Amino acid sequence: MAMSDTFDQTSTGYSVQHAYWLARASDLAYKDEATIEAQAAKWGFGQVRHHRTRFTPPFPLQDTQAYTMAGDRMIVIAFRGTEPTQIKDWLTDVSTPPVTGPGGSGHVHHGFAEALRSVYPDVETTLKGLRTDGQSLYFTGHSLGGALAMLAGARMYLEEPNLAADGIYTFGQPRTCDAVLAEAFHQGLGGRTYRFVNNNDIVPQLPPEPVFTHVRALRYIDSKGKLHDSMPMFSALTDRIAGASADVFAPASDGIRDHFMRNYLKALEQNLG
């Protein structure tokens, strides 16, 4: 199905079309600044700000990147993801203690917390400057970017509720926090958060439970590309058996192939209409 480049800034509530456009915004976060600005303008977002900060995490990842695009009716903040191999150590590490979560609620994976902390003040200042006319606010991101979008939304809601997001859409997001923060998040943002998982994508299955867990509001894409409002047990089981691999981080594995942003976009486009 071909799509026009019309980003509906008046959209509210959940729809597959809205998810598709926020997935496009997540994908755009991987592009260079000029490409981001040109595309945002085509979509009707007249102002763009870029966020990039360097930090020194315990594992190799050099910076955090995001952008904010603001229109007359909507503001979108999209966090850039990264290759799973770049955060493989983060996803499999169980020895480093988590850190206290936003607003002192629960605990957060230390790597994700540090990545957000490095960029959050700039994002917050930018938002306060651009949200001048009651625009709706959406956070989005893929992979690591999904974790940062969820955490940014949680921090804003718990620390500055007047800035709370109207929606948070993530794609291939890893587990990010403990059950205490997940529940606090759900109480405030549960009806506005949608976490998309494509079939055997390995990243949402990590870091391991029970230390880390997911916020609710799953949207699951099965092996045939059909979108479900929850994970059908039979489908999930057979998909995971079919996708079993000796090395889940191998480039050719189901777990990595299903993680690619292009495959999330393809599946969402298939479910439009």
Image (spheres, rainbow, N blue to C red):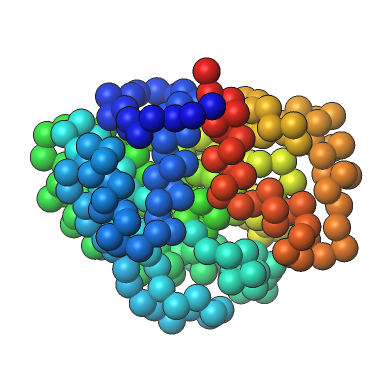
Q: What residue is rendered at 33% in x and 24% in y?
A: 11
Residue 265 falls in image quadrant: top right
Where is 268 relative to 46, above or below? above
- Seen at 31% across and 54% down, the residue is 36
Residue at x 39% of width, y 78% of height = 55
Residue pushed farthest front?
2
- x and y, in percent, of residue 233 in the image: 80, 30
Q: Quadrant of the N terminus?
A: top right
Image location (x, y in percent) of residue 212: 63, 55
Quarter of the image for residue 236 reads: top right
Tell me if residue 204 can be seen: yes
Q: Would residue 35 appear left or right of 238 to someone viewing this image? A: left
* Nearer to me, 63 or 59: 63
Residue at the outermost top position: 273
Q: Residue at position x 52%, y 64% from top?
A: 82
**Residue 163 sits in quarter:** top left
State whether residue 133 is above or below residue 83.
Answer: above
- Residue 177, given in percent of the width and then of the height, sits at 55, 54
Q: Does residue 13 lie above or below 164 as drawn?
A: above
Q: Is residue 192 visible?
A: no
Counting the numbered discs, the total is 0
